[in-house]
Image (tube, rainbow, N blue to C red):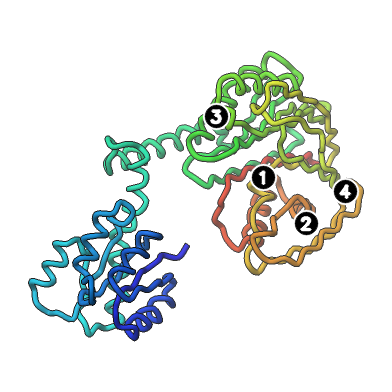
Amino acid sequence: MAETILVVDDDLDILELLKMNLEPDGYEVRTASDGKAAVETATLDPPDLILLDVMMPHKDGFQVIEELKNIEETKTVPVILLTARGQTEDKVQGLDAGADDYITKPFDLREVTARVKAVLGRTRPIKYINPLMRAMGSGFNEAGVQQLAGHLQAAAAIQKKLLPEQAPSFQGFDIGILLQSSMSVSGDFYDFIPLSETRIGIVLGDVKGNGIPAALLMVMIRTALRLLCREADDPASILKRINDLVVRDTDATLFATMIYGVMDTVTSTFTYSNGGHCYPLHRKRTGVIDVLKTGSMLVGAFEEATFASNTCLLAPGDIVVFYTDGITETNAGDDSVVNENILVGSEDVKGQQNATSSDVFYGQDRLAACISENAILSASALCEAIVEDLARFSGSTQTHDDRALVVIKRNT
């Protein structure tokens, strides 16, 4: 979002000149032609910075600064004074009143741009720290923010250690994993739980929301799952017990979607239960992609939730991809166009979309197409190919939601 600058001067030519100079640098420029209008405009919608003329009729710049510093919404907005006066006492008066800098008229436009960037660079952190300190209470200060940042880094490190560093290795199978967090801590997670020499529990989940609350619930679910999966074989019964635990011990707004299943390397089967999660994609060696639509209710949202299990047979050359909605709900970039025509579940699914903006999502169909186009790759390389396709589609490598992938390939 562009930073906003309020330019205040009773000379309309100067207003227009400064606006024309600043807007090409990406700033949103608003204007006011007197002190009263400046206070009203700034209070109604506080800007990121104010360029303020000193000599104005009715209310001069010093009076405007004094008023703004006594208003909660504007007291931290930085101000650069524009003054035709060269006397040292006037500059000192402005700085004493609360101005962050001053520029003497006539000014060089390059100097204006440089000083605007310098002041915003110094004061930008305050814009974000102050609301946080207010939300945390009167006893919270800037040192507390730094301490909180340290705690977040520690939490991220702990969470990272809880996740498997690498996918397990089984003869005849290739497993790839990927996790991208939009914040320092993540609500998306995966885990692999050894059950025997030939059986392994696999989970992929997405706690709704992000940040610390989502990460804490993720840890809770992971811990419960590791305990419960050794007591029962049926994935549906395990999700039911986790659901009841989350419903009982957490707020109603915290819930998760997740898939838990058991892969048997002897029978080449994956028996799973889906708790409100994105449907996995099963690409057969024939090229046809089936959507594994066995699903149940969200985990932790309802006491009466029920869950069902199903089994998927993995033939040589088959691929199963589990993913979170951070993949399929990635927004298209401004220049992206989706034009898809692929086989899904033996049906000809044609999704032709000529929209070009954030109204278009990456979607399940494009994910299926990417899997088919890169089916010869290893499981890890397929994960990377999907991420690269997401970047091309969105026009950015930045993630606005957590993303997780688990890819299972049965070798031929």
Q: Residue 91 — which label?
A: none
Label total for image: 4
Disc 1 vs disc 4: Cβ atoms closer than 8 Å? no
Which of the two marks, 3 or 2, is nearer to us in this view?
3
Which comes before the other along the chain, label 3 or label 2?
3
Residue type pointed to by label 3: Leu
Q: Residue at x 40, y 60 (%)?
A: 45
In this view, the residue in front, 298 or 288, is 298
Q: Which residue is mark 4?
A: 288
Q: Which residue is mark 1?
A: 325
Q: Residue furthest front?
A: 58
Which comes before the other along the chain, label 3 or label 1?
3
Give the Cα separation between the discs numbered 3 and 1.
Answer: 18 Å
Label 4 sits on a secondary structure element that is loop
Kindly indicate the quadrant of the structure image that contains residue 252.
top right
Residue type pointed to by label 1: Asp
- Sort mark 1 into few (<14), some (14-19) or many (20+) by Cα contacts within 10 Å: many
Residue type pointed to by label 2: Glu
- Sort mark 4 into few (<14), some (14-19) or many (20+) by Cα contacts within 10 Å: some
Q: Residue at x 73, y 52 (%)?
A: 363
Which comes before the other along the chain, label 1 or label 4?
4
Disc 3 vs disc 1: Cβ atoms closer than 8 Å? no
